[in-house]
Each structure stands twice: as C-alpha cells, then as structure tokens.
Image: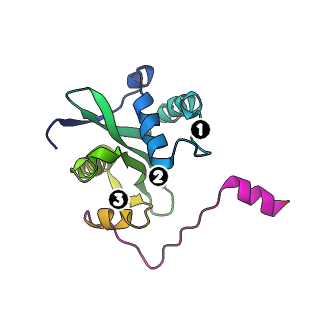
Amino acid sequence: MKGTKIKELTKEDLDKDLRPLDYIVQKHHGVYAMSVKGSWEKRLPMLKEAFKTGRYGIIVAVETETDTICAFLDYWIIHCFVENMNIAFLQNMRVIEYLRGKGIGTMLVNKFIEIADKRWNCGEVHVMAGKPADEFYSKFGFKYKPSDIYMEARIEELKKKGE
C-alpha cells in the first residue's frame, strides 16, 4: 500500500513510544477486554523479555505521513525436536480498522514468510486462525491438516476445573 512501510522492530525500538501497538490491540479486543486493560505497563516488560530470547519478533506497518504504527504481526521461532527443523509461529496480526482491506496484512505476512525462510531456515510456518481469518491465510497456501488438533483454554478455566 502506498504511504505505508513495513519494518521489523529491534530491541532498541522497545525504548521508543510504542503505545500505538497497545492501542491497536485494545481497539481489536475492546477497551475493556480483561486481558488488555491497562496493558501497556504490563506488556512492555514482557516484550523486552521475549526479545531477549532472540526468537521472538514484531513486524509493524507504519504510515509514512504520520510515522505512526497502524498494524503489527508478532511471531515466535522454535526448534521442533521431533521434526528436527525450525518452525515459525505467527502469533497475532492486527490491522487498525480503517486500513483493513488495503493490502497491509498481506505485506506483513509476506515479510514474516521471508524472515522465516531466509533468516531462520524454517521448514514450516504455522498460524492459528478461525473464520474469517482462515480465508485470508489460505490465500498464502496455509491449510488445515486433518491430523492437526488444536485446543485452548484460559488458565482461569483450567484452575477452576482442577479445584
């Protein structure tokens, strides 16, 4: 998209004002979402710790006119002991509402695939998505495998069941 640049954040970028990342998350989930309420103060130390691993990254889209972050994608790289290869996990991708459908998500995913391939030599790239996001990711070649099973639960639910 014209007027938007894609860049990967560095550890040094974490010392800048990155609250637009938090704003995008809160707009996506709703300001009162339990997991993001007052989140920047909680999120920044966790981001810094994740960056220390060297296997976590954030790719952002920046509006060139305002130099404001308008979208992001974060990912993890792990080594799969069983398959003996690196695997890239696209964890989250969010594009601010007024810019959706303008190709920014495509640019972010393409940059992520390039990093997974060229920097990390990943054998697989994984993304967890439901409708309608699965339609978006299928355009890149992502598909569900019949043998894959993915389940999730909030920790609060698990603690209640264990009592």
Image quarter of residue 8? top left
Q: Is residue 32 magenta?
A: no
CA distance for labels 2 and 1: 33 Å
Label whose residue precedes the other's in the sequence (2 or 1): 1
From this viewpoint, is residue 53 visible? Answer: yes
Q: Which numbered dot is residue 71?
A: none
Q: Which numbered dot is residue 37?
A: 1
To which residue does mark 3 refer?
123
**Residue type at mark 3?**
Gly
- Please state which of residues 4 and 87 is positioned toward the viewer in this rendering: 4
Q: Could you tell me if the residues under marks 2 and 1 are in contact, i.e. CB atoms within 8 Å?
A: no
Foreground: disc 3 or disc 1: 1
Foreground: disc 2 or disc 1: 1
CA distance for labels 3 and 2: 10 Å
Label whose residue precedes the other's in the sequence (3 or 1): 1
To which residue does mark 2 refer?
79
**Residue 116 location in percent, x, y?**
32, 49
Which residue of the protein is positioned furthest toward the bottom in this rendering? 146
Chief secondary structure of the magenta span?
A: loop
Q: Is residue 2 left or right of residue 22?
A: left
Q: Residue visible at 42% across and 40% down? A: 24
Image height check: is 136 above or below 75?
below
Tell me which segment is drawn in magenta. 140-162
